[in-house]
Image: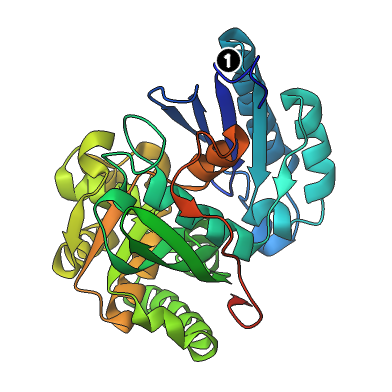
């Protein structure tokens, strides 16, 4: 950013399988986060392409976002696209249409790059402001090896790093083809899900995780588990009984609490599930599959608790746009080296 634009807001946009997530802020100001539910990846796992209806929903939302950006007088817009656009046969043509609406063509990030961005956003993002060692960022309060898990609609990213003295070093990543939308459409066909459907979902999640851990045993060195994005925030909100970003950020949930939320939601039909305080209606259909993925990770890797961070990919995209003077406290010189990244199907 130039000196002429450094005091103007910057908009980060993350286009995911289930949601479009935005973050608007000028350097040093309180960020404004918005989540829009588009179900862009609906039917993708079966058809291999984005449906016209799903693309229409996303383009409508992005048109609204573009209007808000214009009203705010943003200096720049940075956009990323993740699992759905990576996988779809028509992802490129969809993003060209997005470019016409948003004014910039989103960058399709690989699974490993998505993991890196999730790590950066998770440890530096906060409620109030950005900047080195923000008081409410996890990098300011945690020490040691940290595993960040981003459970999305189409994929789940794992990112390992080390936090010390208010700085963070990213070391390894993996992307798993397991996600809340993908697994719901593939395995959870009954309402409520039958035990055998849940068993299939859990078994495939565990097998996929085991494959990654066999290639990347270093993930097992993490002593802290940080979870980000919609599934994690929703589980936290259901546990709290309300959705409040200030309470969710840094929330510690024991394995028993996560298992209890899973058990409750998995045994309720959707019409009952939607009445749980804290559960957004747009996540009623997909949250059980997301729970399957998180409990699998906690069971298999032996984590007794997890911490929720509201920081995510959009925080990292914003951070990288504003440049070193206003960036967070991640050591960006660290990147995956040979053998330190993997993608599992």
Q: Is residue 161 above or below residue 37?
A: below
Q: Position of residue 120 (x, y in %)?
A: 48, 52
Q: Is residue 188 above or below residue 132?
A: below
Lateral position of residue 280 relative to residue 151, left or right:
left
Quadrant location of the N terminus?
Answer: top right
Q: Residue 13: which quarter of the image?
A: top right
164 or 218, nearer to the observer: 164
Residue 344 seen: no
Q: Residue at x 39, y 55 (%)?
A: 167
Q: Residue at x 27, y 40 (%)?
A: 136
Residue 114 seen: yes
Q: Position of residue 210 (x, y in %)?
A: 46, 87
Q: Which residue is mark 1?
A: 68
Which color scheme did the rendering employ for the protein? rainbow
Q: Position of residue 19 (x, y in %)?
A: 53, 41
Quadrant location of the C terminus?
Answer: bottom right
Q: Residue 65: which quarter of the image?
A: top right
Q: Residue at x 53, y 39 (%)?
A: 319
108 or 292, nearer to the observer: 108
Give the secondary structure at mark 1: helix
Q: Position of residue 7 (x, y in %)?
A: 54, 16
Lateral position of residue 185 relative to residue 202, left or right:
right
Image label count: 1
Q: Residues within 10 Å of mark 1 (few under 14, many from 20)?
A: some
Lateral position of residue 24 relative to residue 69, left or right:
left
């Amino acid at each position: 950013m130039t000196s002429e634009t450094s005091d103007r807001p910057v908009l980060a946009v993350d286009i995911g399988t289930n949601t479009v997530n935005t973050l608007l802020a000028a350097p040093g100001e309180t960020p404004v986060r918005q989540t829009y539910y588009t179900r862009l990846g609906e039917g993708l796992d079966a058809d291999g392409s984005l449906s016209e209806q799903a693309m229409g929903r996303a383009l409508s939302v992005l048109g609204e976002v573009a209007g808000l950006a214009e009203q705010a007088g943003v200096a720049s817009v940075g956009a990323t696209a993740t699992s759905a656009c990576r996988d779809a046969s028509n992802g490129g043509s969809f993003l060209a249409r997005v470019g016409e609406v948003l004014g910039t063509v989103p960058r399709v990030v690989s699974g490993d790059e998505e993991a890196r961005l999730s790590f950066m956003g998770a440890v530096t993002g906060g409620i109030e402001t950005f900047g080195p060692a923000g008081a409410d960022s996890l990098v300011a309060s945690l020490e040691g090896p940290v595993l960040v898990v981003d459970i999305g609609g189409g994929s789940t990213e794992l990112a390992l790093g080390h936090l010390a003295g208010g700085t963070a070093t990213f070391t390894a990543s993996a992307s798993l083809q397991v996600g809340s939308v993908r697994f719901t459409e593939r395995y959870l066909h009954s309402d409520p899900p039958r035990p055998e459907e849940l068993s299939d979902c859990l078994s495939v999640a565990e097998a996929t995780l085991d494959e990654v851990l066999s290639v990347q045993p270093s993930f097992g060195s993490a002593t802290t588990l940080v979870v980000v994005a919609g599934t994690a925030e929703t589980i936290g909100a259901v546990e709290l009984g309300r959705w409040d970003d200030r309470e969710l950020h840094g929330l510690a949930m024991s394995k028993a609490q996560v298992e209890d939320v899973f058990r409750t939601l998995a045994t309720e039909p959707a019409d009952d599930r939607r009445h749980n305080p804290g559960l957004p209606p747009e996540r009623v259909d997909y949250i059980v599959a997301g729970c399957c993925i998180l409990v699998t990770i906690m069971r298999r890797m032996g984590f007794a608790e997890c911490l929720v961070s509201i920081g995510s990919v959009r925080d990292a995209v914003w951070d990288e746009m504003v440049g070193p003077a206003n960036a967070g406290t991640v050591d960006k010189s660290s990147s995956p080296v040979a053998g330190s990244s993997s993608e599992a199907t």
